[in-house]
Image (spheres, rainbow, N blue to C red):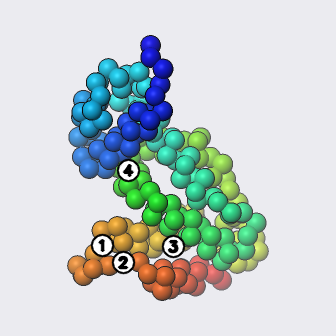
Amino acid sequence: MRLRDTEKVQLVKQKAIELIVKDGLEGFSMNKLAKACQISVATLYIYYKDRDDLIVKITIEELESMTQGIMKDFSPEMSFEQGLHKQWENRYAFAKNHPQMNLFFDQLRSSSYQSTLLSDSISAFKMTMGQFMTNAIERGEIEEMPLDVYWSIAFAPLYNLIRLDQEGKSLDGSPFKVTDAVFWKTFDLVVKALKK
């Protein structure tokens, strides 16, 4: 067996993500990936057991990368507004630096790979974010609410702005680009909606 070539592994990962975003999981195959990478299909099997192994490994690696980006300079001990501010900054920066990743994770969310998204690889992230929410509730900064309600109010507006920015169009079809003014105005409205 040949040794792994780091550059080739990165190319395979990049092309796999691009193909899954473009063609969806149902349109993704090892043959298409090998062709996109200009390598033989046999070469892919040096790195991965099969298609599922490739998707799971890439997902776990990318989740870990995203988690590191999102958690940069964040502490669950921060005040609610300060912590949410840092989360918005980090999540937006990650999305800008890795524009394909939200689309990649969207493909996985509606598939049998969803359990991988909820895997042990991000359990520390989930615990930290849960502790942040618990601390904010205990300090009386926000009302107690189910996690899904909190997430929908705290982060769905951010991810909608990111999606509109990536598409380059507003809801009415006119050109759209996230500006600092739009970004922070939306953030202020989210904080206002969540704070007691």
Q: Earlier in the sequence, mark 2 or mark 3?
A: 3
Q: Is residue 145 visible?
A: no
Query: Amino acid under label 2?
Result: Lys
Mark 2 vs mark 1, CA separation in Å: 6 Å
Mark 1 vs mark 3, CA separation in Å: 23 Å
Residue at 34% in and 40% down: 16
Q: Earlier in the sequence, mark 1 or mark 3?
A: 3
Q: Read off the residue under disc 4.
A: 104
Mark 2 vs mark 3, CA separation in Å: 22 Å
Query: Amino acid under label 1?
Result: Gly
Q: Earlier in the sequence, mark 3 or mark 4?
A: 4
Q: Secondary structure at mark 3?
A: helix
Image-quadrant location for residue 35: top left
Number of residues whose C-alpha sits closer than 10 Å to that of mark 4, classed few (under 14), some (14–19) or many (20 or more): many
Query: Amino acid under label 3?
Result: Ile
Residue at 38% in and 39% down: 11
Mark 4 vs mark 2, CA separation in Å: 21 Å
Q: Read off the residue under disc 2.
A: 177
